[in-house]
Every structure is written in C-alpha cells, then in structure tokens.
C-alpha cells in the first residue's frame, strides 16, 4: 500500500495561519497545542483524506527573499472543491492572496492561492459528479 499522508505547513504567524486554514478554507481543528515557544494544529478536511498539520512559529521570509514559484525545487499540492467561488472569497477574506489570474481547463477553473506566509497551493474546481467518484 502507498498513499500520501498528512501535509505539513510551517508558518511564522500561527494565529493568522490557523484563521486562514480553518476559517478560510473550512478545515476542522482536530488537535491544537500552543505554548509560549511553539504551536501545532491538526486540521481535517470535511470530506476526509489527508490532514493538514500546522507548525510554528518559524522565521518569516524577508521581503523579496523567497524565489518565484518554479524557480527552485518545491512541492505543491491541489485543493479540490465543488464550491470554487465561495471558497476563493473566504480564503481572500481570511488573509489569503490570489497569486495569478483564474484559468480554465476543460471548463473548470483553477487559481494559485497563498496563505499569509506565502505558502501556495492550487485551488481547483471539480464537478459534484467527480467529488462522488472520488469517494469510492
């Protein structure tokens, strides 16, 4: 058996990140631990699958220090949703940034979104039928 486990996201402002990922994206806080020097949370997706784990605080990137996406080796992930417009609006209202224009592929939309620390992912629209196919 082989599958992807949890996604780890390291953040400089834990409170802002927790707001973005839980309130903005709609993930459920399954575990949370905050001390004076560190913070951790496990956030579960409403429809199951891998969890997202936040770790912080880390040092923030200096202005213009982070290389442009694709300029250095990196790992990215997609977050698929049947509620693309509402999810994008919520993410932006909760500290997220839309990196580029919304693009369409085969009639479905995708856009790069960054969390408050600049960690980015692709928000990808799927149809209800595809969501049900993924469940099985």
Image: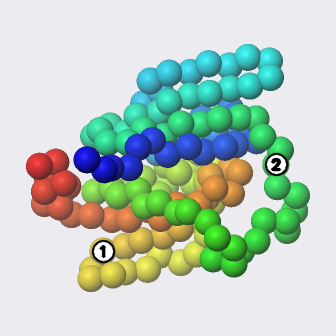
The residue positioned 64% from the left and 48% from the top of the image is: 95
Residue 56, percent from left and from top? 71, 34
The residue positioned 83% from the left and 44% from the top of the image is: 59
Name the residue beneath numbered marker 2: 60
Residue 49, percent from left and from top? 31, 42
Residue 18, percent from left and from top? 60, 35
**Disc 2 crowd, CA 10 A, few/some/many (<14, 14-19, 20+):** some
Label 2 element class: loop
**Disc 1 crowd, CA 10 A, few/some/many (<14, 14-19, 20+):** few
Name the residue beneath numbered marker 1: 108
Q: Does residue 50 appear left or right of residue 92 in this picture? A: left
The residue positioned 27% from the left and 80% from the top of the image is: 107
Label 1 element class: strand
Residue extending farthest right? 62
Vertical relation: 90 (above or below) 102:
above
Query: Nearest the camera: 118 or 97?
Result: 118
């Amino acid at each position: 058996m082989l599958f992807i486990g949890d996604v780890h996201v390291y953040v400089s402002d834990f409170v802002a990140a927790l707001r973005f990922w839980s309130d903005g994206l709609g993930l459920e806080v399954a575990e949370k631990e905050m001390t004076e020097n560190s913070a951790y949370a496990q956030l579960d997706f409403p429809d199951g699958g891998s969890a997202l784990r936040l770790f912080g605080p880390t040092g923030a990137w200096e202005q213009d220090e982070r290389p442009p996406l694709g300029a250095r080796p990196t790992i990215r992930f997609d977050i698929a949703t049947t509620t693309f417009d509402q999810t994008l609006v919520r993410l932006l209202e909760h500290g997220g940034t839309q990196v580029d224009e919304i693009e369409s592929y085969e009639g479905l939309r995708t856009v790069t979104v960054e969390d408050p620390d600049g960690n980015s992912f692709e928000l990808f629209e799927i149809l209800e039928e595809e969501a049900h196919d993924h469940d099985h």
